[in-house]
Image (tube, rainbow, N blue to C red):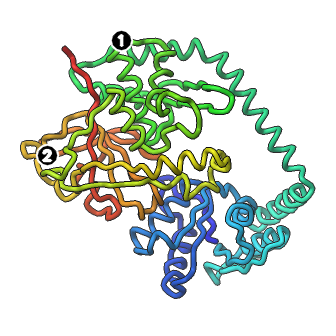
Amino acid sequence: MVLGAKLRPDNSLSPILKLRVKLVSILANTYPDWIFYLSGCCADTTVIYRTLVEDYHIPEDRFVIDFYGKNTFHSILNMKRDFQQSRFYILTSSFHIGRCLRIARWQGLEAWGIDISNYEKVKKNPYLWRERLAMVKSLMLSMLIRMQIDRLVKWYHTQRRRWYRYLGERHLDERNRQIMEQALASVDETIPLTEHFFLQMKLNLPFVFWSFDEKEHFAVNLCSVDCTTVIENVLALALCYRDNRRTYADLIDYYRRIHYKDGIISFATRNHYFTWMMELAIKEGFVERIGPDEPTFPFTGLMDIKPSYMTLNKHLIGQMAHEENYRAIEARQQEGVRYTYIPRELFNMPQDSELGVIHDGDILAVTCDQHTWSRGLETKHLLLAKWIDGRLHFYHSTDDYIGLGKEDVYTYLKDKFTMNGVAVYRFKYNKA
């Protein structure tokens, strides 16, 4: 078990994490049969994983990732509850090992510590009092779990979220109407609609929320987006403008039609993969795939995928515990999707070459094989095309940035060996 820690403000590894990553690389080469369980929040585990895979070239199947280890106690609890491991090593800092081993022992587990340094002195360590207080907290949590009081706590949090949703929906109706008016008031048609609404995302539109029903709730946050949600928001707003449907109910309807197979609202019919969402958007007439069915220059790459993240990581997704959801999603995954893409090496060509088939505002889905760090996902990143001085650039959204990329697509992709090319989609809009 490799425990995470805070990243630097620029999302790079802190000194402590660099030590942990270095030691993992040494252990991976020394013990080729070891599996490494990375536990922490989504950000630090992802950066650790990508560093080990891309910089140290350790095979992806050597890792198991727990994105929900929000603290030491929950990381160890998840190891026991979700992965059924009762004997393992814990790799962490010297001042942290004592607490980790006690927490494991309180939960009936056998654990041994691997110290990342041999120079830290506990009595001089600034974390001494933090560790003592955290030890008390962990002991109380262990006692609560053994007494089954945690069930009451979970019920309380569930009810609190339900009431928050209920009250939030009632108070946000007027704000949502204002958001629609603001977003669609003065559209700049001199640029593609997708580009216009992406730039609107940069303006930090207010929060939008709704719930389809009691079991399948769906939230949209226009002021906090990742690479996928920003494309979803752009498409939904562009469709409202294209079809002259300007109400908040219209926006919800487009999200439903993008996200749910045949418009049926349930977890099993939700499009959990970007490719599934695009296949439905093509069927609905929202977008078109740019590229032939069979390889033709520059679309010389062929992707034949069966995404598997949902079933591979069912222990991390509460709804996947229901047998009917698992079987339905497993069956959809087996259907597979086939399409062509442009290999990354060809993005060094100028706009007046065959690469000019890509237009401003096109959606670029960065492809990858199914053995990359995403573990069963079919795309690594989503970009929005923008030609600048004959070179293909892009807009995108990351954990800490949304806007125009700082380099062209070729420079961005060339050193990322897990990103093998780009599939191209275009929003269907006829100005006439």
> In the image, what residue type sits under mark 1?
Asn
For marks 2 and 1, give the CA distance: 33 Å
Residue type, label 2: Leu
Q: Along the horizontal axis of the image, is 429 left or right of 273?
A: left
- Whether residue 288 sits left or right of residue 254 in the image: it is left
Badge 2 element: helix
Disc 2 crowd, CA 10 A, few/some/many (<14, 14-19, 20+) = some
Q: Is residue 327 visible?
A: yes
Please give the residue where the numbered disc 1 appears in the rendered image: 244
Q: Position of residue 351 (x, y in %)?
A: 11, 43
Give the camera-side residue of 259 and 227.
259
Q: Going 46% across and 16% down the picture, which residue do you hit?
A: 250
Q: Which mark is residue 355?
A: 2
State the image quarter where residue 207 is shown. top right
Q: Position of residue 328 (x, y in %)?
A: 55, 45
Q: Residue 95: where, in percent of width, then height?
A: 72, 73
